[in-house]
Image (spheres, coloured by chain):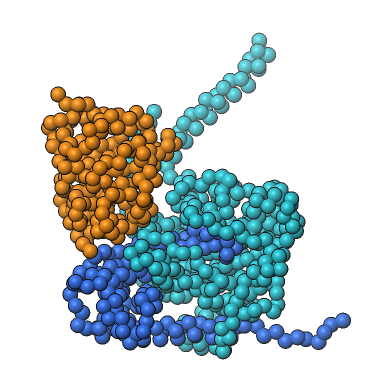
Amino acid sequence: MLSRPEWIAALARASAEELATALAAAAPIPPHRRLRGPEVGLTMLRGRAGGDGAPFNLGEATLTRCSVALEGGPVGHAWRLGRDCAAAEAAALLDALFQAAPERAGPLLAPIRARLAAEAERTARRAAATEVRFATLAAMR
Amino acid sequence: MRPGFADPVLDAQAAFRAVMEAMARPGRVLRLAAPPAPPPPLAPAAAAALLALADAETPLWTDAPEEARGWIAFHSGAPLLAAPGEAEFLLATAAMPPLGLLRAGSDEAPQEGATLILQVEALRPGAGWRLSGPGIAEEHRLAVCGLPADFPAQWAANAARFPRGVDLVLAAGDALAAFPRTLRIEEGG
Amino acid sequence: MYVAVKGGEAAIEAAHAWLAAARRGDPAVPELGLAQIEQQLSLAVDRVMAEGSCHDRGLAALAIKQARGDLIEAAFLLRAYRTTLTRFAAAEPLETGRMRVLRRISATYKDLPGGQVLGPTFDYTHRLLDFALAAEGAPPPPPAPEAEASGAPMPRVSEILAEEGLMRREAPGEAAPPPDLTREPLRFPAPRALRLQALARGDEGFLLGLGYSTQRGYGNAHPFVAELRLGEAEVVLHPPELGFPISIGEVTVTECQMVNQFAGAGDAPPQFTRGYGLALGHCERKAMAMALVDRALLARELGEEVAAPAQDEEFVLLHADNVEATGFVEHLKLPHHVDFQSELEKLRSIRARFEAERAAPRAEAAE
C-alpha cells in the first residue's frame, strides 16, 4: 500500500489528463468543497555552497496549491510545481479520497507511477549509453 | 475547517483597500463588504485585515485559541511565533499586548514596525476621543470600547518615538478603523 | 523653467502595432508555438529561467516569443511577472548529489565512481553548420541509444578530495534562512550565500567575461573542472498543514565544482579550494563562469590579495544583473529634453565666457 508521501509525490508529477482519468476511475466522488485555492504562487529554490555547504537562494519556481475538504471527511492538499490549477485541484481531491481509503491509491496511481518510472529508466539508460569506456592504448615510453 | 475569503483575489483586494483607506483617514470606521466567516473568537474584519496583509514572509503572533490559530495559519500561510516581540503582524482577540514590547522598526527602517490588529468591543464614531494628525483635516471623534485603561498613555509613548512605532488596526464585527503611529489622541470633553 | 508636455500617444500606439506585426513577421510563415520554443529552443528557455530567476518553462517560452528572441528582454518580462505572485514557501536545499544525472564529467579524474557521462552535449561536435537541419520536414532523428544503467552512486569529486583532507570543506549552514537579495538590498561585504544568489541570476555574458579574465591572469586562478553535472533535482517542501516533507517535482539544474589551489594562510594548510556554480536549467557555460567568479570572490575570506576585477565583490555583484543593467543603460534613451536643455545653456554660457576672455587680451593689445 502506498504511503501518503508516496501518493503525494505521484500526484505532484501527474498531468491534468492523468489525474482526470484517475478521478473518473475513483467515481463516485463524494461532495466536497474548496478550502483554499487552487492558486498559483512561487517557491524559493535553494542550493548549497559547494553542493554540501550553507544554503543559498537559487531562484524561484512557480507553484500551484489547492486544498479540498470532503464533506465531513478529511482535507486533501496538493502542492505542485508549475501553474496547472485543474491538476492541483484534482490532486487535492484525490489526496482527500486516498486518506479516506488508502488502499485505493496504489491501483489508481499505478499508470502514473509506471510512466514516471519508465521515464526515469529511459533517462538513466540514455545517460548510460553516453558513459565513456576508456580503452588503454599501448604504454608510451 | 472553514474557508477563507470567498473570492481570494477580489475580496483580499477589497480588504486591503479598506485597510489602506482606514490608515489614510485615521479613526474613520469602515465596514467590510465581504469579510470571511472565521472561527470564533475571530472578528470578520480582523480576519479580513489579517488575510489581506499577512503571508508566508510575515511572522505573526496571535493569542487566538487552537482552532482559530489553525485557520489563521492555513489561510494566511504566515509562520506563527510564540513571542509577540518579533512579529510583523499581531492579531489580539483578548488583552492588548503592551505596545512598548512590539517591534518598532528603526530610524533607518521605520516600516519594520509591527502592525497590531486588535479586536475591540465596539467602534462608535462621533463621540469619545478627539483624534488629530495627518489624514484628519481638523478633528475626528471616535469612542473605542474594550481598550485597556492606560491605552492613551501607551499610545502617547508610541507616538513619541516617531518615525519608529507600531500601527494599529481596530476591529469590531465587520467594521474596522486604523490608528497609524502619527495619530494624536486627546480625551474627549 | 520646466515645461510639462505631453504627446506621442498616437505615435506610441502605432509603434506598438508595428512591433506586433514585426514580431509575427511574414504571415505566410507558420507562427511559432510556445511548445516549439520550449522544446526546440530549450537552451534559450533555460537561460531566460536562470536570469529571470524563475523556473517555469512555459512562462520563459512565452517571454521569448513576446521579446522576439531578445533573451535579456525576456528575462526582464519573467522577472516582472514573478513579482505578481505570492511566495508560498521556500523549498529545502536541492540535493544535487542525488540528482537524476543526464551528464556528469570530471576533468580531474579519468576513472571515477559513476563514470564520465557525456549526456546531450555540444562537446565533440565539429561546429560545422549542418545544412540537413535547414531542410524542414525531415523525419525526427532516431531515439537516442540506450544501455544498461548500473545505478551506481555518483559521489562528488570534491568529496573524494575532502576525505583525503586535500579539499577545503564548506562551512555548514546556519539554522536561519539564507539572506535574500530580492527582499533586502545588497550590502557589502556580502556573505557568500548572497553572492551565490546574485551570480546564479547574473548575466551569463558578464560572468563569462569575468571568469575568462581570471584565467588570463586577472586574479590568481589555475582552475580545473572537478565536476560538471546536469540533471534533475528533486524539490522538497514542508507545508505546515501537513507536518511532513513532500516531494513536488523536479527541476533541471547545472552544477559546476571548480578546483583551485590555495597556498594556505595562518592555520589553514595548503589545500584545494572550490568555486561553485549552480544555475536553473542546462547552462554549462554559466555554471562554469559562476564557479570561476565565486572562487575569485572568495579571495577576501581566504586572505588572498584582492586586486583583479573578478575579485572585487562590489564591482561584480552590482553589475552582474542584466535586468538592472539594461534598465539603467536603456533609460538613457528616454526623453532627457529638459536635462539636456540645462546642459546646453550651461555650455553656452561657459563658451561665451571663454570667447570673451580670449577676445579680451587682444583688445588690450590693440589699445
Where residue A117 sits in the image (x, y, percent)? 44, 84
Residue at 38% from the left image edge and 53% from the top image edge: B57
Q: Is residue C126 left or right of residue B79?
A: right
Residue B110 visible? The answer is yes
The residue most toward the top is C367
Residue at 27% from the left image edge and 81% from the top image edge: A101
Where residue C67 sits in the image (x, y, percent)? 42, 61
Question: Is C265 above or below relative to C168?
Answer: above
The colour of chain A is blue
Q: How many marks?
A: 0
Camera-nearest residue between C318 and B129 = B129
Question: Is C173 above or below relative to A29?
Answer: above
Q: Which chain is orange?
A: B
The colour of chain C is cyan
Q: Is residue C313 left or right of residue B185?
A: right
Camera-nearest residue between C143 and C253 = C253
Q: Which image quarter: residue C98? A: bottom right
Q: Which image quarter: residue C110? A: bottom right
Residue at 73% from the left image edge and 61% from the top image edge: C271
Q: Is residue C272 left or right of residue A48?
A: right
Where residue C3 sits in the image (x, y, percent)? 36, 33
Question: Is C362 above or below relative to C173?
Answer: above
Residue at 61% from the left image edge and 20% from the top image edge: C357
Q: Which image quarter: residue B133? A: top left
Where residue A73 sits in the image (x, y, percent)? 22, 73
Residue C198 visible? The answer is no
In the picture, which quadrant includes the N terminus of chain C? top left
Q: Is residue B162 left or right of residue A89?
A: right
In the picture, which quadrant includes the C terminus of chain C? top right
Question: Is C82 above or below relative to A119?
Answer: above
